[in-house]
Amino acid sequence: MSSVSFTLNDGTIVPGIGFGTGTALFGKDCAGQVKQAIDAGFVHLDGAQAYNNEESLSEGIKLSGKPRSELFIVTKLRPGALAEHVKPAFDASLKKLGVDFVDLFLVHCPIAMKAGDPQPDLPEVWHEVEAIHAQGLAKSIGVSNFRIPHLQAILPTAKVIPSVNQLEIHPYVWKTVEPIVKFGVENGNITAASYGGLTPIVRAAGGPLDPVLATVAERLTKEFGKPVSTGQVLSKWVLQKKIILVTTSSKEERLREYLQTAELPDLTEAEIAEIDTVGAKLHKRVFMKHVFDDTDPQ
Ligand SMILES: NC(=O)c1ccc[n+]([C@@H]2O[C@H](COP(=O)([O-])OP(=O)(O)OC[C@H]3O[C@@H](n4cnc5c(N)ncnc54)[C@H](OP(=O)(O)O)[C@@H]3O)[C@@H](O)[C@H]2O)c1
């Protein structure tokens, strides 16, 4: 179990570092990798209908032998689903995952994936998600990739305020995403979760943050007495902003490194401020570009 956790607005405690079965594992059998992640200490598993691998996520859980009660299982409504699709799609997920309930069910995306496809009616979709919550089939419910207008569309009629908004969060989008995170906190204590958090080193290496991350990693290495990587600096930056970290790796050693992040000494306020400032010099969004018009990102 990662030794960092967050308490959601419904009182649920979420293990703060999650293992995802999307991106690198999208559409792939993830059983072996899920088992490896659980063996390494992950208990928070981030799946989605769109990843098309919920059966193998279930298989990985079985292979690990970890009791259901010790796991935090997340799935997400397939992007583009309309209100009438929510319950049948959710039931199919439960079946594929081989569980009676999920710990967190997220609306993956607020709009249709392609221009011309029917747009989901967000308040109606959310009411269907609330009905699943009311039946105890999803212990917590939330959203993903919701900008401020999408949150504003559901909040006035919501009986349950979303617990989580999972977003692409790293220093190269922080300037545009911070207002969404702040809006969530101020409008019902919605906890942000980060995906794509390693983008500055994995997908945008050579950017202005490289020397800053290297300097902080060196300072932490001295203080911790063991090597601290630039990836861990980024993960620590996410966690210190009280944001859940969702990541992934095919490598056992890196999985352990991710979990160890929680034990590292904190970044100083000055280091966080420098990462924010230098990160704002480059804008690099990788995912869900059809949702985020970065000229008007909030
Ligand atoms: N809600 C959404 O719309 C959405 C969108 C995207 C992702 N997600 C979720 O978030 C999860 C994580 O997404 P992500 O892949 O974007 O996470 P990430 O934490 O930004 O990146 C993880 C990837 O970085 C690689 N990596 C880590 N350290 C590295 C290093 N030092 N050098 C080179 N490569 C390195 C890992 O590869 P190795 O295997 O080599 O370690 C892994 O594939 C997904 O699985 C999914 O569950 C959600």
Image (tube, grey):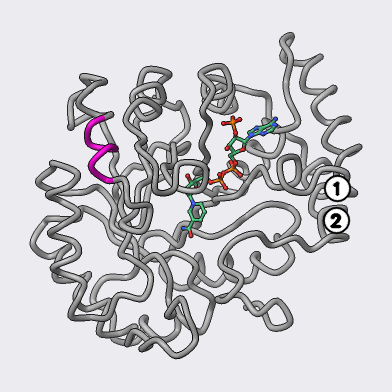
Amino acid tagged 1: Glu
Badge 2: how crowded within 10 Å, few (<14), some, or many (20+)?
A: some
Q: Secondary structure at mark 2?
A: helix
Badge 1: how crowded within 10 Å, few (<14), some, or many (20+)?
A: some
In percent of the image, x 39 and y 42: which residue is there?
28
Q: Is residue 56 magenta?
A: yes
Please state the horizontal and vertical placement of residue 153, each as a whole percent of the image: 41, 86
Please state the horizontal and vertical placement of residue 264, each as a whole percent of the image: 64, 23
Q: Mark 1 highlights which residue?
A: 274
**The C terminus - image quarter:** bottom right
Amino acid tagged 2: Thr
Q: Is residue 103 magenta?
A: no
Camera-nearest residue between 149 and 5: 149
Q: Mark 1 and 2 residues: CB-CB less than 8 Å, in contact?
A: yes
What type of secondary structure mainly makes up the magenta span? helix
Viewed as shown, does residue 96 lie left or right of 121? left
Q: Which stretch is magenta?
A: 54-59
Please state the horizontal and vertical placement of residue 120, each as a whole percent of the image: 34, 84
Q: Mark 2 highlights which residue?
A: 277
Please state the horizontal and vertical placement of residue 74, each as a whole percent of the image: 31, 48
Ligand 1: which quarter?
A: top right
